[in-house]
Image: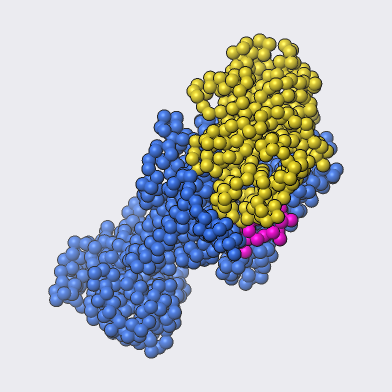
Chain colours: A blue, B yellow
Amino acid sequence: MADLLGFVLSGLVSGALYALLATGLVLSYSASGLFNFAHGATAYLCALAFYELHSGFGLPAVPTAVLLVCVLAPALGWGLDRLMFRKLARVGETAQIVATIGLLVALPALGLWTVELLADAGASVKPAENQFGLPGVGPSPAHSWQPVDGVGVDSDQLIIWAATAVVALGLWILMRHTPLGLQLRAAVDNRSLVELRGLSADRLSSIAWMLSSGLAGLAGVLATPLLGLSSHDFTLFLFVSATAAVLGRFVSVPLAFAGGLGLGVLQNLVAGYADFAERITGFRTAVPFLILFAGLLLLTRRRRTAGTAAVDPPPVDYLTGRSRLRRWGPWAVAAVLLAASFYTVTTPFWSGLLAQGLALSLVFMSFTVVTGLGAMVSLAQATFVTGAALVAGLLLSHGWPFVAAAAVGTCTAALLGALVALPALRLGGRSLALATLALAFLADQVLFQIGWLRNGDTGWAVPRPVLGPVDLGDDRALGVALTVLVAAAVAALSALRNSPSGRAMLAVRSAPAAAMASGVSVVRTKLVLFTLSAGLAGFGGVMYASYNTRVNATDFTAMTGLIWLAVVVAAGLRRPQFAVVAGLVYALVPHLLSDYVTESVHLPVILFGLAGLALANDPDGYCAAVPVRLQRRRLAGSGAGTPTATPAGEPPTALPGDTATGDTLPPDTTTAGTAVAGTATAGMTATAAGSTGVVAPAAETPTVVPGGTSPAHTGLTGAVPSEAGTTSAAPAGAGAAGAMSVEAVPGVGDGGQAGGAVGFGGRSFADALRLRGIRAGYGGAPVLRGVELAVRAGEILVLLGPNGAGKSTTCRVAAGLVSPLAGQVYVAGRDATRDGAVRRSRAGVVLAPEGRGIFPALTVEENLGLYLRGRDGRDARDAVYRRFPGLAGRRGVPAGALSGGEQQMLALAPLLQRPPKVLIADEPSLGLAPRVVEEVFRLLTELRDQGTALLLVEEKATEVLKVADSVAYLARGRVTWCGPRAAVEADRLTEAYLGLAATREGAARP
Amino acid sequence: MSRPTRTFAAAVAATALLLAAACNSASTGGASKTDDSVRGVTDTRIKVGGIVSMTTASGYSKKDTDLGAKARFDRANAEGGLHGRKIDYLGAEDDGQDPSRNLAAARKLVQQDKVFAIAPMSSTTFSGADFLQKQRVPTFGWGTLPSFCGPSYIYGFGGCMVPTPGGTISQTWPEGLEQVMGGAKGRSVAILANDSDAGKFGIRTYRQSFESAGFTVTYAKPSVSAASVPSDWSAYTKEILRSDGGKAPDAIVSVMQTPYNIGLFTAVKRTGYRGVLTDPTDYDPGLLAKSATRKALDGVHVLTSFQPFEQQSAAMTRFGKDIRKAAGKDVPLNMHMMTGYMSADLFLAIAGKAGKDLTVSSFQKAADGFADTGTLVGDRAERKGQKESFGCGALVQLKGGAYVVSAPFKCYPPIPFT
């Protein structure tokens, strides 16, 4: 019993450290969606700093620890967030994983380098090597007690428990009982909605990273007496604590915390009672990784499209349309030059390095397959390399010929790959990466500890092959042979990528569901990718061992695999040639640096690590950085060309349609507009700016015809020229008359608007929200092509249109979620185009997004608290509960558990309490029962009556027209008609709704 | 065949052609294969380099090995060099315990710097061994790796310290412990190693070694997690402490590295254990600087395979003086310095015997039948040293913050390893 108690107690020590690290992981993950592999490195850095400040500079322990945990570590987290994590949150998951792996090696090297530099500068730092039994914050050596017979406890352990308990309590108070905690949790739940509520998600992300780094710092300082200054041990510790983060599904802090504690105890119990496994060498060593792997398999929620990184679209091919000569010529020349160089210019030393780099390239190309083609991050490639090389060595020692041994070794690696893939296939993204990492450690610690396979520390001799007349014993011959092999592999991989199976692989990568629907087996494709990649890695491993002429089980560890991945991805995964570049760089650069730059061994490590950081800017890797930029510039050039063509090209396409629907403008006006626009140097600017010229707006005019000038709608073609003139001059006056609720205001300067902003009776006559000439789109695909809209305080403007017309995009532009390519957004007459969602929301523009604008994981009370915050927030919430008794009864219930109608009420209720200036509601009735829809519309009218300007997007046209003050039709990214509700005609409605207008418009195009 | 494939096929064909042309010259290129290589030797100088793991992710460094070698070469040069040739010691390359960097370092020293010999080579990995053997580079280092046992150009400064089945095991440890404990009969020992293949091998070796010395081995298991130092030791100590029929054994023998030993000994002492503790790695006066390690290792008997610094002799005094001179200040002595110093010393001794006409062949010939006595590592003899250790050692005990010799330095006859 005392045993058990002892195991549990001491297990809680590492458990506490796991808990601290796991909590930090979860916090940072939820802040930016990336799993921070460098979290352990942060802890190490803090341990190092603590040691140098305390032991080196002689600062007192406790203040130093407080300074580190509360100031320096959070500052590091803040800096990293600003520099990289924030940007990384927007790139693919592979780049995220790799960038933090880069940090994992760079941070410790940076710390050691700093120490080295300080020592050179004569500071009183102490060497960081061979330091054992370091003092922590407590007494050193630690006091120990024996509370129960046979169970010892010492002061370091007590300090760890106490600190962890304090942190747990502090975190609980922070997360559950402070506004900041509420906001943090909300940001985890729904990041973009947080922005729409006027809270800066970036700021919250910074805070989460600061907290996370602070926790890592605390773990580092506390673990100093236990782990010493071994960055390796800190990183391993982190990988184990990842299990706890998995337990909390990367979002739940309490679960991760408890998981960490439990993990420590479980690990200790297994170590204490695992006598059964004594015969398996390495079993006890492997326990944490067994737990990690099992945890990942059991706890990761199965996704429908397993095995693929969640967000990892294949990059745009910058070589599209280039001739094959351009694509391949330079590489072929480089290969020939490289091969020739072996016998001409390179010295034996550099020949050897080049051969090494080429052998490594074969291994690196395996990443191009599994990660580049398959978007799966495998951290087990080193395992395949070691496995293949050991098997080949074993066979060679039995007198097998090289080719046969290499073939069997390669097949073994492929088999291992399939084995690793099988359980890993149901996982995706970071879970897959962690699972392969766990398997790699398991292989290191159990599989490669098998005596007959590894042959002790001696390993196996892998003599260089002699193939016919070619003796590869000479480095130069080996170099040329490897060049040929590498070229063949590059060609084969490129052919594979362009083959039908390669396209199937890409399809599985980018749209697994669609691929499945078109009969591509996702599982089989992934299995093939893994197997192929493992085989290639294995073959590379055999060649590398043959370069070494020997293989040892410890030559390539799981950690090596991590570094490899970082090096390859930093170079780029798009084309197999980049892997060759990575291999050569990896082999050559450290020597070039030490020859020409610095003797310090830390600098190359830092550089390799920071190459990962560069991924934040160039997710495609440095090989493609320049071409991609060039292509972007080219696109921008042609992009600038396209809009230049637009004013000339588009109005004519739009106009015949307008004529057909009755919105009129004679061809000559168009021609005039176009002609003038064309004469401007950049016609695009003229049109988009809208107000730069008198005539240019005229080209826009037909799209939106003011309600007040309704004659235009009656089809009086002849009146139009003057009409156009009126429009460009009239709106100010028309606005003042208050006759128009919606208007097009082309060509009116802000000055005129300012005049209109003078209001009376508490109501502003100014447009509460106005969009002018808005062009917007996603990734180069235009959606909005010059939208003109305005909505006044106390009015409801309903935006109708067929699917894909751009209604939601209009909402997102209005709310600041999407920034327009051209055009302006005015809020209460002020140009707010450059404001993001947060500032827009603070200015009183609130978007109720499509679906439900609530935080499902937060309670009703907390949801309300996020909008009704501030001093009188409680009173306001009470008022909401009085008004909606249904919500009052369920204030402690997570919002996600409410019915759809209740959720929509919850989203709107706080707005009623504090009416915003502008409410943009994107399909508020979606998926609601008719009775609830009525209620929702009633609430919206109530809001209008309180003075809110409403922009309402709806599909349920008939119902919504009852509450509308005015109506705008959106088709193909333009407002095709806009006017008061009274002017809406049934057939026009049908046309707008069904998109017939657009179709007819298209049909009339020739 | 698509066009890129064709382009590549052309490239491949071109390179294949080149390869075919190349292979004719291949056999003549590469390493100098002549028997009387004088690479790195001129009339006035002999170029020597070193490979040492200095920066590692585990924070373990053998950096001072470089200083030890420098100290020894400095003295040789001060004494007029080797038959009139000064030793041009290039300093040690850092391999960072990384196999690929170890090989690259060996290649750089041989192919780029053109050294005659490598001394010291001290790391946990030695993937450059095959290359150095093939290039006929005499290499001297710490013989704790299998590559020091067998290859004719690679020498361990204390001999080959990895027993091979059919070879012998050194008895210095059990013999020393016998002196400490006043006999082996009826004394029980528990042996603990890491849970890895190497640990398993260590257990196998030392179990035989201690048993044949007369100890009762009550526990011998490679059970401690090898990946990283455990923060909890109770799971491992529990079994050891009741292995002697429910009681604690008289001695606990740890075959692990320093950080493990510190954890293990702290945990064992916390339970009130009063027996003998011993390990082979913690003879490092640097450890005395920290109160925690001083406390953890207090009373521990540490095996050394060289004469302890505390045991005075003319050679030891000279060692201390040389180190001080090379470092430029007073530094605490440690075993890494000794490794470097004695690796250089063995090289100088054999090269001295080779005489004025120094070539690789004459060096190798001098090594055949080389023998001397009374050095800091005891009685040396080659080629015996490429099969087994010189078999000399001592135990030192940490007592009240200082090391004292508990079993004086002595050479013991080895036993056959089965």
Q: Is residue A591 left or right of residue A712?
A: right
**Would you say residue A283 sits in the magenta stretch?**
yes
Q: Residue at x 20, y 65 (%)?
A: A753
**Would you say residue A772 sits in the magenta stretch?**
no
Residue A164, by quadrant, is: bottom left
- The quadrant the N terminus of chain A occupies is bottom right
Name the main secondary structure of what is drawn in magenta. Answer: helix
Q: Is residue A82 left or right of residue A355?
A: left
Q: Image height check: is B415 above or below B232?
A: above
Residue A954, by quadrant, is: bottom left
Q: Image height check: is B263 above or below B90?
A: below
Q: Count of labels shown?
A: 0
Give percent across and percent down for residue A345.
65, 28
Q: Image height check: is A790 above or below A361?
A: below
Q: Residue furthest bottom?
A: A931
Q: Is residue A606 visible to us here?
A: no
Q: Is residue A155 left or right of residue A287?
A: left
Q: Image height check: is A651 above or below B287?
A: below
Q: Residue furthest right?
A: A399
Q: Is residue B246 visible to us here?
A: yes
Q: Residue at x 51, y 27 (%)?
A: B331
Q: Residue at x 60, y 44 (%)?
A: B261
Which residues are drawn in magenta?
A: A270-295
Task: Give whichever of B289, A529 is nearer the camera.
Answer: B289
Task: Give whichever of A788, A92 is nearer the camera.
Answer: A92
Residue A360, by quadrant, is: top right
Q: Residue at x 84, y 44 (%)?
A: A398
Give percent across and percent down for residue A956.
40, 83
Give percent across and percent down for residue B236.
63, 53
